[in-house]
Amino acid sequence: MANTTPNTLPTWPPSSLTVQQIGHLAHLATDYALANGIVYRPLPPPASSSPSSSSSSTDAPAPTPPYDSVIHAPFSLVPSPFPRPLFDYAQSLQPTYDVLYASLASSPDFLKRVVGGSVSKVDSFQASLWKIYQHLQNPDRRSRQRLGLGLFRSDYLLHRPDDDEDGKEGRASELQLKQVEFNTISASFGALCTKVAALHRHVARNSAGYFGAHDGKLAELDRLPENEALDVLSSGLAAAHKAYLEQRGLAPAAADAAKAPLPLSPVVLFVVQEHERNAFDQRWIEDSLTTTHGIPVLRQTFTQLQTSAMLEGADRRLHVVPSYGGEAIEVSVVYFRAGYGPGDYPTQSEWELRERLESSYAIKCPTVALQLAGAKKVQQVLSEPQCTESILLDAAKTGGRAVSKDEVERVRQSYTDLYPLDASALGQEAYRLARAQPHRFVMKPQREGGGNNVYRHDIPPALDEMERLDAQGLVTPSTAGSIDGGGGGEGEAVKRREGYILMSLIQPPPGIGNWLVKASSASSVSPGAAVLAHDVVSELGVYGSILYRDHDDEGAEGKIEVRHHRSGGFLLRTKARESDEGGVAVGFSVIDSPVLL
């Protein structure tokens, strides 16, 4: 499948809809969202400004989201146009990307070179993960569990490159699809995006195809694809749970599990954040595990697990005491919906807990190695000549899956221009470009969760500040907050900018708008309005699940054995072009779905 398509996206949204029709659609869609669990917990109430509160202790806890009410998640009123060939192209890439990253997580030498190098020396978060990984390479400490589970999402943007570099003639090439990032931990919104796709199909069916908008194409349901993202994620967790039961010689749930009480043990453990507003995206996965697969689920935070999690036996089986009390319950799979950013590790105790979980016999989703493989530096290194080829063209590293040179080339076509910011010749050229043409680039750290990138003309001042700190000889961030208080590779002069990569900005096509529907304030008596954003950008994510056995304990670099593999489903996030970041949970975008054209 090609990664280009003619630049034929229509002007959007359809202009034929009247104000009355838009209002009707917003009511219909909002009711569907609330009735079908497309919901968040509301924002916490603002801190009281009353006189009585001013005299209260400054140590009072911060307000938390209410647990007894919900608001609908933000969504688009109509699906956004997306070229069918590029949608299919993104879907076709996912199986190859899945085995690629599973192999990287099973490649100690690669991880040592890429993450254990400059990245772990200037980035405290990566340094701490790296120290856990290194510490558990000791045969006496490492987990005896050789299976790992990846629940991935690969994110893309449409790209319209200029034929003439200066843009003076205004020519434009065909649309392309370019990868933004590859998520290896807490790939969220699989459940809510499944339901938003169903929302758009429901509204289309109950409004004569959005009142015949866009020449009736919105009434053609084959243009509004059904979404299997929720099934992709839950089936991966179920496969890992089943594999664990087989390892332990335990019987799986009966075929009619939905009609019988669930066994108390073993359970799939969801590691979640405190006061999670996006809990219902997780709860739908939990519901799928319990009702479809007969698998019980336990949810706990890092704070709870510090006292409830224990290791038993020579193989260090993980047991957790539930919050409601009773005996400790054996854990089959640890599913991290927390732990992807520094905020989840405020003290040394959280890092010690992460190592305890990693050393256990439970199957981890992801392992620390797989989380390290998701670093932006890895994405940049894969774009270097022959790096991707050295993995995908070796059948031992793809679980025996034959990957052709054409498939590898299609993966490469999804890469945008990526550069290191190190002392290499390419890194020096990237530094020059970042200084001379910052409007062309984004500078990315090794972070997830949104809000961390440095865009365009903010790049030179950020470089200035890094160089000021380098010149002062101040300790790098990796000397504070890592698992043992030390950085990775003391005594080596590493510049702070080496913890970043430089990425050429992807240029989405203009002329696309949409109505964005966000929940009204708690005090409002009317539903939230559909607000027209005249210029939006849509980011497409594709999901994959892979259960694999590594062989790095045998010295077989990158060799994997695939036990379960499924890809499919999609997340479309749409945001106003003025917003560079795109995280739904942090309020920058809405959940969307495509109308394929």
Image (cartoon, rainbow, N blue to C red):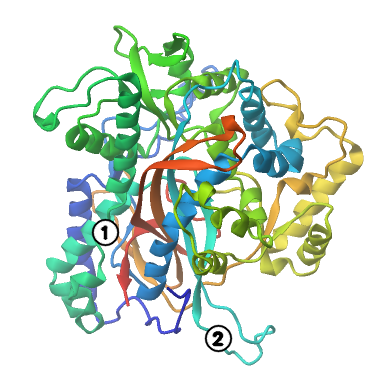
Q: Position of residue 219 (x, y in %)?
A: 18, 74
The disc labelled 1 sits on which kind of residue? Ala
User: Is residue 349 shown left or right of residue 252?
Assistant: right
Q: In this picture, is 564 found above or below 572?
A: above
Q: Position of residue 340 (x, y in %)?
A: 53, 37
Rate crowding at label 1 as few (under 14), some (14 to 19) or many (20 or more) other CA atoms within 10 Å.
many
Rendered image: mark on residue 35: none
User: Which residue reaches farthest bottom?
Assistant: 169
Frontmost residue, 143 versus 402: 402
Rendered image: mark on residue 172: 2
Q: Identify the image quadrant of residue 478.
A: top right
Q: In this picture, is 12 found above or below 172?
A: above
Q: Position of residue 253 (x, y in %)?
A: 19, 27
| Residue located 86% across and 36% down the image | 492
Rendered image: mark on residue 197: 1
How far apart are labels 2 and 1 at the CA level? 31 Å
Rate crowding at label 2 as few (under 14), some (14 to 19) or many (20 or more) other CA atoms within 10 Å.
some
Frontmost residue, 307 versus 412: 412
Frontmost residue, 112 versus 22: 112
Q: Identify the image quadrant of residue 259.
A: top left
The disc labelled 2 sits on which kind of residue? Ala
Q: Earlier in the sequence, mark 2 or mark 1?
A: 2
User: Is residue 383 shown left or right of residue 569?
Assistant: right
Helix, strand or loop under label 2: loop
